[in-house]
Image (cartoon, rainbow, N blue to C red):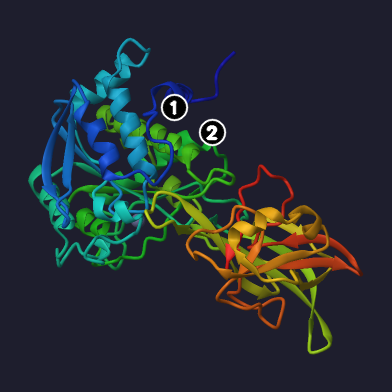
Amino acid sequence: MISSLSPAQDVARQLHDAHEQIKEKTLTHRRFKHQDIVPLLQALNQPLSVSQVGESLEKRPIYQVKAGSGPTNVLLWSQMHGDEATATMALFDIFNFLQAKNDGFDTFRQAILTKTTLHFVPMLNPDGAERFQRRTATDIDMNRDALRLQTPEGAILKNLQQTLKPLVGFNLHDQNPRYSVGKTGKQAVVSFLATAFDEDRNINEVRQRSMQLIVGMNRVLQQFVPGQIARYDDEFEPRAFGDNIQKWGTTLILVESGGFNGDSEKMTIRRLNFVAILSALKAIADETYRQEETAAYQAIPENGRLLFDVLIRNATVMREGHPVLVDVGINHNEVNDKAAKTFSYKSSVEDIGDLSTFYGLEEIDATGLMLAPAYQYSDTLDTVSELAKLDLIALRQQGVLVFPVRKAQADTFPTQPVHVLYDGELPAQPLQLEQIPTFLLKKGDQIHYRFVNGFWKENPDTLQNGVID
Ligand SMILES: [Zn+2]
């Protein structure tokens, strides 16, 4: 049988399959910290070497991992935004891969290590990672600091680019998981960008190489997530690193890890980063990217903004005594716990009205259903822990979803699917923009859906948590 896959797609499939074995197993979620990666860096062996390239504002050392001895320099950095950790995990998987032997990939690995010299900077913003926030400890967005260089971390990046003069740079980020692929309702799992270097978005040799490399990465990834790869908006941002590095003569590839439904810790996308980056490094080593057409880059759909986490279609809500037909778009937003080690969801009503041109990662057809307020428990509890004494299943059955409480820790949401009223009070309307989506969908007296904090499933396996309002 003749395989319809190209050699690069075949190898990508093998890398994808091998990832489970190769991956760095101590990294299991996105909120790991600098102190979690330091021992991993210290344990790296040949052919990798580690050196410190500077430190963050709060004096966390920032390291460079070097591999290979080839004439072509490649610079890869991750997590310049502290809460965008997916690619950092993939870089540690790549470190494991580069150290491995006799696993069927020796030729592949040697091609990369003899033709290129790789310089990795994992977690460029360790202070932001500590808080799991986008910005640095100075509260500056490093990716708007390429000109002013007020962040020590941004200065490190510019210095590396200026001294190494890499042929190619990989700028590794996470994007909003609700980007869609063009006008489809498909979630953009990964988006790429051959970043513009000027307002007119001209294509010179440097930027053309970005497009060619992205065409190859897109092709290898399509077999795993068909139709779910997109292209980031290429509007020129004069303050950003990607745009400037492209201008300074390094072919710049932006990789944005998006969302993959049901995989909030992004392990699937981590694996796709592993596959895409290694495939691109091989294409750089072999110069096979030169065969790619830039038209194939232009054909990748742009990111769209057509997704909600939940879309309720055709519900009826009463307004001043009149029934109004509405769709309701709901998003589940992550809220860090105090130590930024884990998170809860706090959901919000993002939009109300005719949302027929939008999609939901999950959708409910509420045709014939009335959106009505949830019922409030008749007593006021002293603390959230008293919820455990109540028959929550029976109360939920009756539509009682809201529980007034006298004392609550507003940053620790209940694990039960309940809406705790502490500071807040229920709005007069069961449906308002930006409110926490807790309500019922009913037909007459019969309750069809019970929404608490934007979640409705009775299935205990579904990620959901209550909320303190
Ligand atoms: Zn980012």
Seen in the picture, residue 197 relative to 214 is either above or below; the reply is below
Contact flag, marks 2 and 1 (Cβ < 8 Å): yes
Q: Secondary structure at mark 1?
A: helix
For the residue pair 124 and 192, the one nearer the viewer reads as 124
Crowd class of label 2 (few under 14; some 14 to 19; many from 20; radius 10 Å): some
For the residue pair 44 and 197, the one nearer the viewer reads as 44
Of all residues, the one furthest to the left in this rendering is 163
Of the 4 image quadrants, the one containing the N terminus is: top right
Of the 4 image quadrants, the one containing the C terminus is: bottom right
Q: Is residue 368 visible?
A: no
Residue at image location 19% in from the left, 22% down from the top: 47
Q: Which residue is mark 2?
A: 223
- Ligand 1's image quarter is bottom left
Question: N-terminal of the two: label 2 or label 1?
Answer: 1
**Amino acid beneath label 2:** Gln
Seen in the picture, residue 40 relative to 21 is either above or below; the reply is below
Residue 248's spot in the image, x, y percent?
Answer: 16, 55
Residue 177's spot in the image, x, y percent?
Answer: 50, 54
Residue 211's spot in the image, x, y percent?
Answer: 35, 47
Q: CA distance from mark 2 to mark 1?
A: 9 Å
Seen in the picture, residue 434 relative to 118 is either above or below; the reply is below
Dividing the picture into quadrants, the one containing residue 274 is: top left
**Amino acid beneath label 1:** Ala
Of all residues, the one furthest to the right in this rendering is 444
For the residue pair 448 and 305, the one nearer the viewer reads as 448
